[in-house]
Image: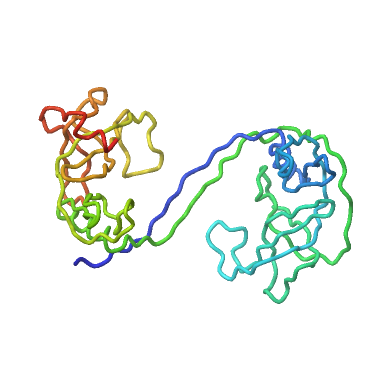
Amino acid sequence: MPETLSAPLVVEFPFTRSLGPIQSAFLTGLRERTVLGVSTAGGKVLVPPVEYDPVTAEELRELTEVAATGTVTTWAWNPAPRPAQPLTTPFAWVLVRLDGADTALLHALDAPGPEAVRSGMRVRIRWADERTGAITDIACFEPYDGDETGQSSPHGGEFTDPVTGIVTPARLDYRYTPGRAQSAYLDALSRQHIVGERCPSCHKVYVPPRGACPTCGVATTEQVEVGPRGTVTTFCIVNIKAAHTANLDIEVPYVYAHIALDGADLALHARIGGIPYDQVRMGLRVEPVWTEGGRHPDHYRPTGEPDADYDAYKELL
């Protein structure tokens, strides 16, 4: 039995969204050191603002300016900040109800230690030196010894050069441990073999194996070698080039397909090569192409065999 594998894994992509009038006004306001909320028909002021009333689902349009000071409603200490978090030194995550608002805003509080933080303490916004129209225009909150100042007041939401869209980098880095079943699968791939596991109840063979049958809910331990040839069950043509992904530096258009390997009862997905993209079809018989030193097939190519009959793979669509 091969050693159980473990490796760091990073999932990262830029999330781009356009802003409607409410979010545009809120972020542009931060750039101008102005905090805006939105008023509901029931008289509550929501900060950060939302576009629809969470209670009635009514569209909200009435913007309201609130103070840059507020009260901590609850908090949690962060002793080890991660990259790209608001502060590089230990800080508290806090929910702050700004003066004039009825809901709380999540942000960071710069404090010397957890003993200096408490629910009910007064805080104020520390603005970033350079502001671009993002939540990071609030550098953090800091302790404030003043009383509640200012009430909410109507605001037209009009600014020069409003922010209309944002790009938010999303990143998740963690250590992935595939477990017994997938470790054995990856070990076999490194030796240019493809193995699945058979369910002792329904006798279906799953590739890649998950260690249990998704239908019967019982453990699977019997290894079964499948393929290496298989049948394209369905596919899509990719016309957008992957950005900032070295291992997907492939000229478009190209084809990604679900492939039912011979002897498997679950289709896996892989890239199709060795054939013009517009000639790929359901039922096409394919085989893996391994690169030197590769731990998995680089792509699948046609075998030259006649296409598989639809009835042979229809249950795997």
Q: Could you tell me which residue is drawn at 86 percent across and 39 percent down?
A: 154
Q: Could you tell me which residue is drawn at 23 percent across and 27 percent down?
A: 280
Quarter of the image for the C terminus: give it.
top left
Q: Position of residue 186 (x, y in %)?
A: 23, 56
On screen, residue 17 above or below 282: below
Which residue in the rendered view is the most extreme toward the left?
305
Q: Position of residue 98 (x, y in %)?
A: 79, 55
179 or 192: nearer the eye? 179
Which residue in the rendered view is the most extreme toward the bottom?
115
Quarter of the image for the N terminus: give it.
bottom left
Q: Position of residue 114 (x, y in %)?
A: 68, 74
Residue 186 seen by the camera: no
Corner quadrant of residue 178: bottom left
Task: Locate residue 102 relative to residue 13 in the image: left or right.
Answer: right
Which residue in the rendered view is the most extreme toward the top?
278
| Total numbered badges shown on the rendered structure | 0
Corner quadrant of residue 91: bottom right
Task: Locate residue 89 relative to residue 205 in the image: left or right.
Answer: right
On screen, residue 306 above or below 295: above
Q: Could you tell me which residue is drawn at 25 percent across and 59 percent down?
A: 220
Q: Position of residue 158 (x, y in %)?
A: 78, 33
Task: Locate residue 254 relative to residue 224 in the image: left or right.
Answer: right
211 or 296: nearer the eye? 211
Residue 97 seen by the camera: yes
Q: Could you tell me which residue is drawn at 32 percent across and 28 percent down?
A: 253
